Image (spheres, rainbow, N blue to C red):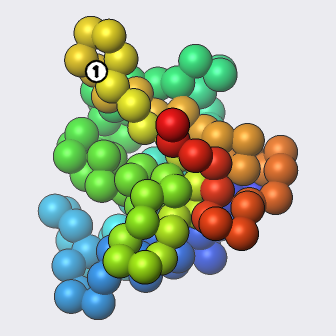
Amino acid sequence: MSRADASAADEVHDREGADGDGGDDGGPGDMAAQARFALETLAELDAGNGVSLPRLAKRTGLRVSVLLRLYTLMSDARVGDEPGPGWVRLHVDEDGRWIARLTPVGRGDEAPAAGGGESTA
């Protein structure tokens, strides 16, 4: 998948901040690897309907809280003045489950918008 390369993980890592906290399970390098793996797993499982974060957590071995943080950084959410790349959209379904889905930008179907990607509205 075109978005799951090292530069993608580095971009997510850069957005997390300069405090050196790479996540719950290790240092900054671990977070880049986690981001890449989380994005690849979402791409594998998302058939257009999205994938629940508990299912992704079971598949990746990462906690739901870690996935929520990683996918938020991959969404079009703003961290400070920086908009995200817009690769992932997160929402809560009618049963209260967090669902992640790849956007067309995340699948590589279209170029990212100047504002950072697809709207989450």
Q: Is residue 55 above or below residue 62?
A: above
Residue 107 screen position, x and y as percent: 73, 44
| Circle 1: element type | loop
Amino acid identity at mark 1? Arg
Q: Is residue 12 above or below residue 29?
A: above
**Left or right: 1 with respect to 30?**
right
Q: What is the quadrant of residue 17 in the picture?
A: bottom left
At 47% from the left and 24% from the top, the residue drawn is 51
Q: Residue furthest front?
A: 121
Q: Residue furthest left?
A: 24
Does residue 106 appear in the picture of this structure? yes
At 29% from the left and 90% from the top, the residue drawn is 18
Q: Nearer the viewer, residue 35 or 94?
A: 94
Q: What is the quadrant of residue 56 in the picture?
A: top left
At 52% from the left and 56% from the top, the residue drawn is 76
Residue 38 screen position, x and y as percent: 46, 48
At 22% from the left and 67% from the top, the residue drawn is 23
Reading the image, the residue beneath label 1 is: 97
**Left or right: 20 with respect to 98?**
left
